[in-house]
Structures are given as C-alpha cells and as structure tokens.
Image: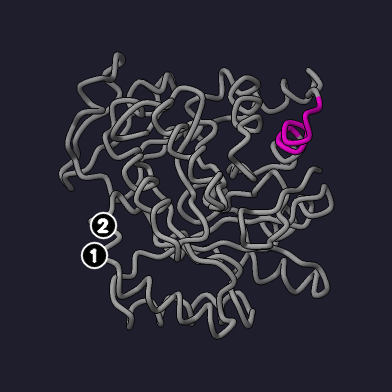
Amino acid sequence: MKYSILGRTGLKVSRLCFGILTMGPLQADLPLAEGAELLKYAVEQGVNFFDTAEIYDSYSYLRLLVRSYPNKDLIITTKTYAVTAEEMKASLEKARQELDRDYIDIFLLHEQESALTIRGHREALDYLITAKEKGLVRAVGISTHRIAGAQAASELPEIDVIHPLFNIQGLGIQDGTRQEMEDVLTKAAAAGKGIYLMKALGGGNLLPQADDALKFAFSRPFASAVAVGMKTRQEVDINVLAASGQPVPDELKRQVSRMKRQLHIDPWCEGCEECVKHCPQDALYLGEDGKTHVREEECLLCGYCAAACPFFYIKVY
C-alpha cells in the first residue's frame, strides 16, 4: 500500500480510503461482525483510512475496528449536515461516543454546494474549528458534488480537507465538466488543501470500465487518496491492487463480476422523475410515496438513470 500526507493536515493516509456507505445499513447492510471483519481485512492489506458519515449509521462497525487495533493510527473521516453550533456539538459528541474515541480525525460538512451553502453552515463550521483547537478534531473540511463547493472551500484558510465527487466521466458533477473540477482541485491542492476523491466508480455505474476508472482516479496528482465503497474481500483485494498500481488478476475480476448487483435509489430521492424519463427499459416508476422505485426484473443496470439524476441519488452495488 502506498501512503500520502493529506495536504497540510499532517495525517498519513493510505491511497485507498475505505468508503463505509456501501457495506452499511443504507446499502448492503452487512451484519455487524461480518462488517467489522471486512474492515479488519482491509487494515491487514494496508488500509488505514476510512470514510463514513452520521447519516450512514455505520459507526458501530468502526468502533469494533478501533477496539481491535488500539495502537494503530487509523484515520477516520465522518460528515454531518449540522447547521448550528448546537447541532454540530451533538454530531461531534455522537461520533466520539459511538466510535469510542476521544477525537475525530477529520470532520466534514456534508454536501456543501457553494460559498453560500458554507456560509449557511458557518456556525457549525466555527464550532468545528473551536473543537480542533481543543484537540477534539484533527482536521475540518467539506464534501461536495459541485465545482462551486470545491472552489469556495479552496478559498477558505480554515478548511483543511476537500472531499469532492470526481471520476473519469465526470458522472455526478452537478455544475460543470470533469476538467473544470480538476482545474479547481489542482489549485486547491497547490494551496495546501488535503483532497481525497469520492465516486471514482460513479456509485457503481462505472463498473464496466472499472480498471480505467480506478487507474484514472489514483493517477490524479492532486488527490492524496481515493474513497471506494466495498462490501467483500474480493473488492478490497482489487482496490488495494489498483491503489498500489499493480495489475488485477483476471480470475479476481471474474469473481467480482459474477456477484449479483442491484440498483439502489437513496431514500432521500426527491421524485423529480428525470431518471424515469431516461430509463430505456421502463424499469423505473414514481411510487405513491413520491419517490422513484425500480422493477428489478426489468433493470439492466445500464446506469443511464444515474447519469440523469441531478442529485446523484442512484447507485449500483
């Protein structure tokens, strides 16, 4: 495993960051013991960097991991939608208690869209900055799907880390092109921001070109790490090899390709129906709850719906 220093944070992170969402309650929902064993397997392969969020409801997996390696420097990022200082205090204390840690390595404001959004969360950000001064947080930052969010964060000296959506096709970038995002991130990294990427595989929609997509993401000089969601040991093996610049054996690829996958629509779908309009199989429909649903027997996992979703709420896992 290769490691990098995350911007000016001083945190040494594995190039592969384990994205917890895929294995957690919102997606694969692995049993607690099974999920913890998968995380431990990743650590034994050299992974020391883990990304989660308050909304993922996955702290219990990481708590077991931390307890299994009391003397190992495991770097954990979490995220919150907190707006006020009071909400941020509650989010921070929840994370510390449920992870059984005195401090959180990296705490991010979740899905910040622009300078205006960050300004609206300013009270929460200020609370994080104070918590950092007290040693309760080691670095603060934002996650974003938007170029405007990354640009705004790059201009704020108090922001240490940017966690942007970025992949070979630019799938999910909501306000511009892949190249425009890359230009902003290159400048942000040069200014000392720690950058680790999300959605290198487009939420599973780029799996047919996984080799190229992973090589592309790990080759970006501005990125210290790439977060990839995983739920099996075979996926860990593939991503560890990719992060290390080593070829993936064909048999391992075949094992992963044979795994049953399904379309996942986030529960916070807003029912705009753009995905329904773009589904060539008529496999999607708007339910009585005002959210999109899928007829699995009709779905070909082509990913056209994910490309059409303006909020990137559709994934394949």
Mark 2 → mark 1, Cα distance in angstroms: 5 Å
**In screen coordinates, is 258 left or right of 291?**
right
- The residue at which mark 1 appears reads as 120
Q: Residue at x 46, y 81 (%)?
A: 130
Residue at the (43%, 25%) spot, across then down: 179
Marks 2/1 in contact by CB < 8 Å: the verdict is: yes
Q: Quadrant of the N terminus?
A: top right
Q: Position of residue 31 (x, y in %)?
A: 62, 58
Q: Kindly tell me whether residue 262 is visible in this rendering.
A: no
Image position, residue 239 (x, y; %): 70, 36
Query: Circle 2 is placed at which residue position?
Result: 117
The kind of residue tagged 2 is: Thr
In the image, the segment drawn in magenta is 238-246
Q: Secondary structure at mark 1?
A: helix
Determine if the magenta segment contains residue 293.
no
- The residue lying toward the viewer, choosing from 307 and 296, is 307
Question: Observer-nearest residue: 194 or 107?
Answer: 194
x, y percentage for residue 230? 62, 43
